[in-house]
């Protein structure tokens, strides 16, 4: 694993390229205290960020949902990405844009605070695990859509994800499967989930959690390959009917799931053929 302090790249902050080790924020930064930041997770392949425009548009929408006034437009943010890639001679890397409120005040409202933007590149992590991973069903539930802006990729949304994954790892699992407030299957801590039966993919409707850009891409690829895709409310009891399972995300791309522990029983998945085909095709698409 690459330690962040070992990175010698430059970070783009509010229009300036700053050496990584000198990129700092104040301890009284509003977003640090109130989880009022939004971000994106992006991947650069061969020096080009995959679906950069879509990521940038979502970043701005996420910020606006939290009342953050972004001082840059889509084109300006995309050009800033290009500067980061050029300055650091990036080929393959994970890219993290972040928007946050400044340190002018600790009053709960952020409407009079400055809005800041950084773009950082991190040398790429492994694309996915060669073997399938195992999931544990978390007791934590996703928040109701009318209690938090679920389509905003905000730091606050990840508190439960951090806790759920930590608990799953402590129990010997690789990740946690999260349910929504009604008990339907939602997603994993940082990835979207798909199930396979025959030549059909089943995935939860993305109106109660973030509709991942990788998720959307995989759905497009699956349809191009002649697969049927059904977006439905899925219950845990239905899992036994499926032969395959995988998750998708920017960092992990496409990852097979070997099992899901429901607490009273463990469901295993042996059919990885479709997921492997989608993973192969996704790897081609991101490098086009």
Image (tube, rainbow, N blue to C red):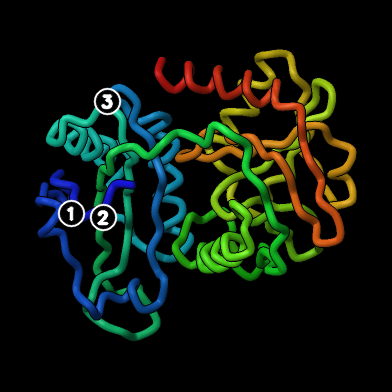
Q: How would you rate the neighbour count of disc 3 (Cα within 10 Å): few for under 14, some for 14-19, many for 20 or more?
A: some
Q: Earlier in the sequence, mark 3 or mark 2?
A: 3
Q: Residue at x 67, y 39 (%)?
A: 257
Task: Identify the residue under disc 2.
Answer: 117
Say what secondary structure mark 2 lies in. strand
Q: In 3D space, how far apart are the residues under numbered discs 3 and 1 (Cα atoms)?
A: 22 Å
Q: In 3D space, how far apart are the residues under numbered discs 3 and 2 (Cα atoms)?
A: 21 Å
Q: Residue at x 40, y 69 (%)?
A: 36
Q: Quadrant of residue 10?
A: top left
Q: Residue at x 66, y 47 (%)?
A: 134
Q: Does the rendering let one see residue 149? A: no
Circles 1 and 2, Cβ within 8 Å, touching? The answer is: yes
Give the percent coordinates (x, y) of residue 42. Answer: 39, 39
Indicate the quadrant containing the C terminus: top left, top right, bottom left or bottom right: top left
Task: Identify the residue under disc 3.
Answer: 47
Give the percent coordinates (x, y) of residue 285. Answer: 48, 18
Q: How would you rate the neighbour count of disc 1 (Cα within 10 Å): few for under 14, some for 14-19, many for 20 or more?
A: some
Task: Identify the residue under disc 1.
Answer: 14
Q: Please state which of the two labelled residues, at mark 3 or mark 2, is closer to the viewer.
A: 3
Q: Does the rendering let one see residue 145? A: yes
């Amino acid at each position: 694993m690459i330690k962040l302090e070992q990175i010698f790249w430059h970070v783009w902050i509010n229009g300036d390229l700053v050496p990584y080790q000198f990129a700092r924020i104040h301890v009284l930064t509003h977003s640090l205290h109130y989880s009022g930041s939004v971000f994106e997770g992006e991947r650069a392949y061969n020096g080009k960020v995959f679906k950069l425009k879509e990521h940038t548009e979502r970043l701005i929408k996420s910020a606006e949902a939290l009342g953050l006034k972004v001082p840059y437009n889509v084109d300006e943010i995309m050009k800033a990405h290009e500067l980061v890639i050029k300055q650091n001679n990036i080929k393959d890397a994970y890219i993290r844009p972040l928007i946050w409120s400044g340190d002018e005040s600790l009053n709960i409202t952020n409407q009079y605070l400055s809005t800041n933007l950084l773009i950082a590149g991190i040398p790429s992590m492994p694309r996915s695990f060669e073997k399938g991973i195992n999931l544990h069903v978390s007791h934590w539930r996703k928040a109701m859509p009318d209690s938090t802006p679920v389509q905003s990729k905000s730091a606050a949304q990840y508190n439960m994800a951090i806790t759920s994954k930590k608990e799953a790892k402590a129990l010997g699992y690789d990740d946690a499967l999260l349910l929504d407030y009604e008990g339907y299957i939602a997603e994993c801590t940082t990835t979207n989930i798909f199930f396979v039966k025959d030549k059909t993919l089943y995935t939860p409707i993305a109106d109660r959690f973030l509709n991942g850009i990788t998720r959307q891409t995989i759905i497009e690829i699956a349809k191009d390959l002649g697969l049927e895709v059904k977006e439905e409310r899925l219950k845990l009891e239905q899992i036994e009917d499926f032969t395959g399972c995988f998750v998708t995300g920017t960092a992990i791309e496409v990852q097979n799931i070997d099992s899901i522990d429901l607490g009273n029983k463990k469901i295993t998945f042996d059919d990885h053929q479709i997921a492997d085909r989608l993973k192969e095709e996704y790897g081609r698409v991101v490098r086009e």
